[in-house]
Image: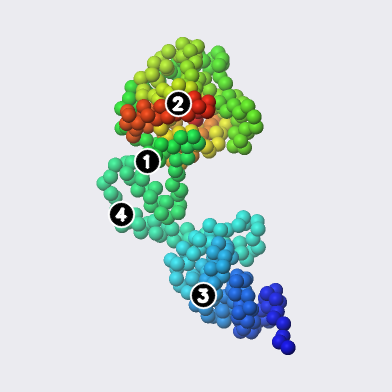
Amino acid sequence: MSAKTPTEMEFNAAAVKAMAANAPARAKEILRDAIRAYPKNPVLWINLAAAHQALSDLPAALLAVGEALKIEPLSFSALLFKATLLEKQGRDNEAALAYGDALTQAPPENRLDAAALHVLRRAREVHQRYVAQLSAYVRRELGAPNVASADSRRMELFIDASLGTRKIFRQEPSHFCYPELPAIEFYEREEFPWLADFESATADMRAELTQVLAEDRELIPYVNFSNAAPNQWAELNRSPRWSAFHFHQGGKRFDENCARCPRTVEAVDRIPQPRIESILPNTMYSVLKPRTRIPPHTGPNNVRLVVHLPLVVPQGCGFRVGNQTRQWREGQAWVFDDTIEHEAWNESDEVRVVLICDTWNPRLSTTERDLISTVMLAMHRFDGFTLKSDV
């Protein structure tokens, strides 16, 4: 009668005991028998790799780790073991890349023991050094290309994204996504020849804003969910910490507010705003109180872009779209794609106010704008939804 095959746990316990007794050759034989019986157990393969390493057979150890990764490709411990073996063999670049793979699967540090934490920190050190060396090499090869500032910025992002040091943000509209429009965080001023004229009205706008703030009427919370707000908006829902003085909202004109600020409305009316019944445009003074942060979010559609004209900007305010963080400068407008993740903050002790309005995406033809308006209006009439503006 043949002997009963040990269980996986029994095989493993015997191998661990042999390793503890400084008998890696015996552990290797036990694990080979175990793997013949249980070839899909990744722990057995990892322990076999450890036995090979103890016997100074690093190539065999690497092969064993490879078998474990075939079973569990995202195993943090296996990926980390592979990287350390490559480093011990002097395969520095391969080791750095393998460490990078392991870092993508790393658990929180408080879940690691001291030994694993030491290896994790070593992984970061090796991988960061590799990335820095590769970055320097690529930029030396590239030299100083004679390109426009926008091209240079895209090239820098391409390099950093290829190195894994920066993320490429994409459009994530919540309602409408018109195809084949580029995901540009901040557009170049040259695409909006009306910007300088728009900015020239800053003093008049600020004077009208000052009167509005003095009276403090018609400022309403920007975030206004009637039911429970999504988690990201819970803190600001129906809060005066972020409020708005609307000239247009969802295509509706606020006549009294427009009458109080005629110079502001006149300047906005001169820019190419989308005008779609019950949907667009949106125009407002956006008032952000001290020590307030607007969380990362995306806007409803990519057929229109958002214009910011800063009117009151204390120190400590900032704005991020995708990878780019900028500081507002009073009287200097910019245009951005709000379907790319963005956020804003006011870390000062004073109020920040920006005039916000919509403009058509300049990459859309007049015919496309007309057709888009028809489609959006038809959908609104059928379903009755309304699109809000964004920060």
Identify which residue is drawn at 52% across, 71% down: 66
Which of the two discs, 3 and 2, sits closer to the camera? 2
Q: Between residues 227 and 59, which one lies in front from this camera angle?
A: 227
Say whether disc 3 or disc 2 marks the residue closer to the N-terminus.
Answer: 3
Residue 316 higher or lower than 108, as above or below: above
Q: CA distance from mark 1 to mark 3?
A: 46 Å
Name the amino acid type tagged 2. Leu
Q: Residue under circle 1?
A: 180
Q: Earlier in the sequence, mark 1 or mark 4?
A: 4
Return the residue at label 4: 142
Q: Between disc 1 and disc 2, whose residue precedes?
A: 1
Q: Which residue is mark 2?
A: 377
Say what secondary structure mark 2 lies in: helix
Q: Position of residue 236 (x, y in %)?
A: 60, 30
Task: Kindly check if marks 3 and 4 are in contact, taking CB atoms under 8 A apart as contact.
Answer: no
The answer for how far apart the CA atoms under marks 4 and 2 are is 49 Å
Q: Say what amino acid the circle numbered 4 marks.
A: Leu
Find residue 13 and report its image quarter: bottom right
Residue hosting label 3? 63
Q: Quadrant of the N terminus?
A: bottom right
Residue 335 in picture, x, y percent from top left:
40, 31
Q: CA distance from mark 3 to mark 2?
A: 62 Å
